[in-house]
Amino acid sequence: MIIRGGIVYDPANGIYGEEMDLFIEGGRIAEEAAGPELDASGLLVMPGGVDAHSHIAGTKVNTGRIMRPDDSRMGTEPRNPVCRPCTGYTVPNCYAIGYRYARMGYTTAFEAATPIINARHTHEELEEIPILDKGALTLFGSNWTVLECVRDKDLAKLAAYVAWGLRASRGYGVKIVNPGGGEAWGFGANVKGLYDTVPNFDVTPAEIIESLAKANEMLGLPHSIHLHFNNLGKPGNYTTAIETLDLLKGVQASRMRQVVHIAHMQFSAYGGTGWKDFESKGPAIADYFNRHSHATMDLGMVLFGPATTMTADGPLEYANSRLLHAKWANCDYELEDSSGVVPLVYGRKMPINAIQWAIGLELALMTKDPWKVIMTTDHPNGAPFVNYPEVIALLMSRPKREEEIATVHELVKSRTALPTLEREMDWTDIAVMTRAGPARILGLEDKGHLGKGADGDVAVYNLRPDEIDPSRDHALVKAALAKARYTIKGGTLVARDGEILSAPPGRTYWVDAGVAEADANRLMADLKDKFDRYYSIQISNYMVQDAYISHPNVIRAGLQVREGEDRSSHALAREA
Amino acid sequence: MKTIRLSLTTEETVPIEAERISPDQMAGLELDQIKCLEAWLGNRRITLDALFSIQVEGEAQGPESTTIVLEGDFSRVKRVGERMTAGSVIAKGNLGMHAGNNMIGGDIHIMGDAGDWLGREMRGGKIVVDGDAGNYVGAGYRGERCGMRGGDIVIAGSAGAFLGEHLCGGSIRVEGNCGDFPGAANQGGSIFIGGSTHLPGAEMVKGSIIVGGHAHMLPSFVRMEDVEMEGERFVKFSGDLVENGKGEILVAETV
């Protein structure tokens, strides 16, 4: 395939709006190619979008669907010769997730949190999401084995467990949600800070985070730890955020990337002592990121309208449901974690919601380096992902922000810095925050750029960067980003002007990390005991089998990478 | 004034979904266009003329001067008058489920019985039923936090269970008896039941329910003082305490 004459933004390769032709051969970007030609003369061309944090598959997404038949009705689309029927808005069905991302020019999305014990369900849903390449991050923040290894200061065994957990769940990276809190919630309690002790384990969240970060780097995983802070969603929690970030300053990265990625930063950038004096600490957080380089974040932007909050932070969802008098689902995952789901509506006249909205924009606009920030709405916690064009239009246009500020609660003017911010992002910033940045942060070498050998994922938009002024023409920008002129996935034209033309299956990424055989053996003896005594299922039924991943893309990490052999990895497989 | 008459030409046993039978959809259309409006017969897409004989008299400026008359037993025809804003629908016999869904204005008169979900999530206008109505009159559909928000529903006969579930406004009047759990999870609005019912107001937080006959009350309501209204004595209850609610229920006889 040849894409002719587009204005290409490929910041990972130093291309900032140059007119050029793109060639895709065998599903990858090439120097020349045959086949059909697409005319993109003068149009905006970027790599396919990459979403590094989105709740698109698994038990809590499905719980959201079950408890929200009202949401199902908000997004029904009948089937057609290419597409299967779609439902839902905040919690769309699997098909809708694939088609709607593809319409916006996105070709990759990562599910943000999966307990190992429920990973099979996650993969069953990922299998049904058409078009997209995807992966799932695995939860490690409250697992008993993690807590015990941390207590015993046995990093080698912890790394072996992380490697085994990724293999068991066919997971891509280490997700940590309110570390220790998931375990405490089993007893109706929570951990209130970094140095609060987890009941029955005599470890603190600080120790869990630091140990997992070190284990992550021992294994040389493509992604860093992916952290949801303690005290998330509470007024005054920005101090916990900064304290936690400081804790990780000394950890040495094993790859050219951050040592910690902060999930949905907006929910942890809060000041005030309670909801009455709730205020933004977005500027303080942005300032921290401007002064340090070991961490990256995704926004977790809140937009006004319906959302379905879902997280492994069980106690947070309990608090949400009490505060809002809303529906509540709660779950406990045996020896692993907890979770909750609460549907809600963000109102522009609600002071708290309006300030949350402003904080997301502050974080993006005040953090100078776009490579440190991924544009997300923490779908569907802050807003459904179909609203990304609205976020981008807000980031690119101060007049649009001013129009919005005039309609939201007036406390935005006194409790946030948003009205004073002049920055308007350009297409390079946007290409970084939605493509190049998330791919680099996740460690996806073939994604987020258009260099030779990269995946043939390309988005062409009905916008002429040389002619339009996004600041003034923000409505045009928003409309064009919602319906890509062309979305190309792996060299196949999948969408044109919002219409899905074909729906090939995407690949699922997972990380296979090898560890020393001695450590694997020590771990397996311990796990055998846990399964015998506590788990409701057998270890043989616990592992996600290869049959559940029909298009795998396995990334090797850990020992075998360094030693050039994968004996140790097989040790884990044999034991399991 | 425009009058559109529809009568069923076949006797169908599968449900018909015909949300286009509404003054808003039909006011500006000629007879031929009305005949070609789409509906669903079970899982088959059809046009209205496949099921109905249709006659049109007069001209209309808009929906407010349009009347739709349904002749025959329409008890299998669903979603008539959905989202209508003005004008009127007169069913000479029964009318099926979801009549007046999300209705905003105008009126619907059902001379026979109404099916389930009558006036669900309606916001305005008036529905009058000469016979009985099914379950979930004026309720919110599955998962919805708000049912009816405005308008009036008057039922001369009896109604089924979960009348006015999640009611947020408007009023429902049932002259006869009512099934279980009327006014469940109410957040406003008013319900009058002339006859008897069972367990009214479960999880209600606001709004009022008056029961002219007898009712079995939930234990989570507090008995308040007796009150007199139009010469009759009622016992007043407040609740539902399960939801820390401030709803009000007046019952003539408690069981």
Image (tube, rainbow, N blue to C red):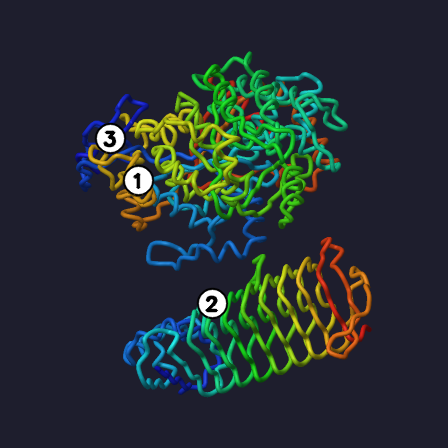
Neighbor class of circle 3 (other Cα within 10 Å; few <14, some 14-19, many 20+) is many
Three-letter code for the amino acid on which mark 1 is drawn: Val
Residue pointed to by mark 3 = A8
Residue pointed to by mark 2 = B104
Q: Position of residue B211 (x, y in %)?
A: 72, 74
Q: Position of residue B16 (x, y in %)?
A: 45, 76
Dot 1: chain letter: A
Q: Which mark, by number, is residue A477?
A: 1
Does residue A547 appear in this view? no
Residue drawn at 33 percent across, 30 percent down: A431
Label 1 vs 3, first from the N-terminus: 3
Neighbor class of circle 2 (other Cα within 10 Å; few <14, some 14-19, many 20+) is many
Labels 1 and 3 positioned on one and the same chain: yes
Dot 2: chain letter: B
Q: Position of residue A82 (x, y in %)?
A: 33, 54
Residue drawn at 73 percent across, 67 percent down: B249
Residue drawn at 38 percent across, 71 percent down: B24
Q: Position of residue A449 (x, y in %)?
A: 32, 28
Of the residues tagged 1 and 3, which is closer to the observer?
Answer: 1
Residue A572 relative to residue A181: left or right: left
Residue A449 relative to residue B236: left or right: left
Of A441 and B116, which appears nearest the observer? B116
Q: How far apart in space, not on screen, are marks 3 and 2 (Cα)?
A: 49 Å
* Quarter assignment of residue B141: bottom right
Dot 3: chain letter: A
* Quarter assignment of residue A61: top right
Labels 3 and 2 positioned on one and the same chain: no
Tell me: residue B76, above or below residue A167.
Answer: below
